[in-house]
Each structure stands twice: as structure tokens, then as C-alpha cells.
Amino acid sequence: MKPYVLGIDIGGTNTVFGIVDARGVVLASGSIKTGKHAKLEDYLEELYQEATRLIEANDAVDKIHGIGIGAPNANYFTGTIEDGVNLPWPTPIPLAELVSEKFGVPVAITNDANAAAIGEMTYGAARGMKDFIMITLGTGVGSGIVINGQMVYGHDGFAGELGHLIVKRNNGRLCGCGRTGCLEAYCSATGVARTAREFLEIRTEPSSLRNIPIEQITSKDVYDAAMNGDKLAKDIFDYTGTILGEALADMTVFSSPQAFILFGGLAKSGELLMKPLRAAMDKNMMPIFKGKPKVLLSELKEADAAVLGASALGWEAK
């Protein structure tokens, strides 16, 4: 068997790719900007050129067994991206077929959160676990559900969209999916920035966030302000963590996971997020499940996690 696979993670902002060996070591990785090209063909060409350069530089020509791809709304069964809400090209995109033609090796795809879950199960915090839920807190909120040691795809390949649980039934924010009140609209990095804008408009107390043009505020700005003791910024994290904790309590009744594993930039906010999250989760937990599911942080380096998960699919690619 050829010794390497190529793992590709297509995010709303960046596409990261890496050469991975059978032990899960990322030999080398690179990235391109996802939204740089208006045409899909141009994006695929840049991906091909950059990945080929990496493969050549690492003496891996003719040694790639397969390619695994994690991408938004990618369907493991059909090999297509069916509704790429955070991507700039018209969908559906038969991505597995297009990439396979370009590289000349078999390709398997799944959504980015499923890929991260597979990576976590193989190399990270979920090693040895048969029941867990991965929650990715990035530009959106993704999830990968593992039950009895198997990834849950559902009958159509799309199971596990927990970022689109409705958490606000009345007057909820518009989500990228077209519905209102989704978890993603509140607990993603984008959601935190939206909360900041709302709080700044309806509240009057001083905050260092008022020094930043309101449309330019990012979740990182909110984190930095909170770490510097800014009360309004801390309240934004309380609000976000509470909503996420309530949602995790709701998810528990569905599959009784051993753990929720949080991944992504927002997960690194530490106690700012975790303290309100744990309190809300405990307060809203059905008694039979109280104290059972752990909340863990991903053990994989952010740059590697989705690439590793995607690469695990590469070994299965036919």
C-alpha cells in the first residue's frame, strides 16, 4: 500500500492540506485562501499546484494512496458539496470526482465537522470512545456525532447538523442556512461578533470595544477585551456560553455521549466560555444524565485536526 494520504480541509476562509502517513503524522502542510477565486476551476487549479509542490518537496510523488476532504455540507455518500453556505461557488459541486480527476487518485469527502470528529477519534481526545459528539466552533457551528464507534451519516449523508438546532424560537437571528434562531447564529465566532454589536447598541456602559468600528469587531477582539477585564465583553461570553451549555444539555438526551469535544478558535477562550457553559449545561440537564457527559477540548493542533480527520477518510477512498 502507498505510504501517504493527502488530507484537505476546506473552510470558509482557508483551505488547509497536508501529507499524512499511516501513523497520523502530518509530514508537511500548506494552505490557500478559499474565497480568492470567483471560479471553481481556478480554485481547484491553485489547490492542485500548491499540493503538487508540497508532494514533490516531500518525496511523495506516486506515493499518495488517496485523498480525504472535509468541506462544508459535503456528502460522504455522493461525493458532492450540495449546499456550500460559506463557499463562493454555485452548488452542487461534484468535488470528489473533480479532485480525483485532477490528482489521479481516489477521493472521499465528508463535512468538515465529521472529518474533525474522525481525526479526534483516531488521534485525539476521543481515542477509545465509542459515543461522543464533536462540536466545531468556527465561522459556523458544525458537529460530528459518533454512536457505537460509528460516524452518523443518516439516510442521506447529512446527519449531525447540530449547529442548526433552533435555540431562539422567537425573534431569532437570521442564520446563513436561511432559518432563524440557529445555534450557529449565536455560538460561532461570527455569532460572538454579532452579539457584541447587539450589546454595544442596546447598552450604554463604557467598553474598550467601543474604540473599534462596530462592523469590524471580531470574536478575537471580544476575547482580548474580556481578558483585560472589560465587563461588557465578559457578558458577551456569558451569553454565548449559556446558550451553548443549554444546547449541549438538549443534545445529551439524544445520544447520551460520553463527551462533547469542542474544537475551533472559540473553544480556546478557556473559562470565559467554559464557566457559563458548564453552569447552563448542569442547570438544564435531564436528571438521569446529570454529571455524565464530559466537556473536553480538542487535543489536536487546530491546523492539523481537520487535515488529520480528512486524511483518515483518504485511506478509505476507493
Image (tube, helix red, strand yellow):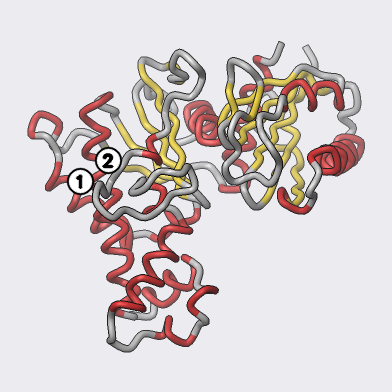
Of all residues, the one furthest to the left in this rendering is 287
According to the picture, the residue beneath numbered tag 1 turns out to be 281
Q: Is residue 298 visible?
A: no
Q: Is residue 252 visible?
A: yes
Q: Residue at x 47, y 19 (%)?
A: 153
Dots 2, 1 in contact, CB < 8 A: yes
Across and down, in percent, residue 185 comes to 40, 52
Q: Residue at x 56, y 48 (%)?
A: 302
Across and down, in percent, residue 178 comes to 46, 44
Across and down, in percent, residue 10 comes to 66, 40
Query: Could you tell whether 112 is left or right of 317 in the image?
Result: left
Distance between the Cα atoms at labels 2 and 1? 6 Å
Within 10 Å of the Cα at label 1, are there few (<14), some (14-19), or many (20+) other Cα atoms? Answer: many
Q: Which mark is residue 138?
A: none
Considering only vertical position in the picture, is 285 above or below 60? below
Across and down, in percent, residue 162 comes to 38, 36
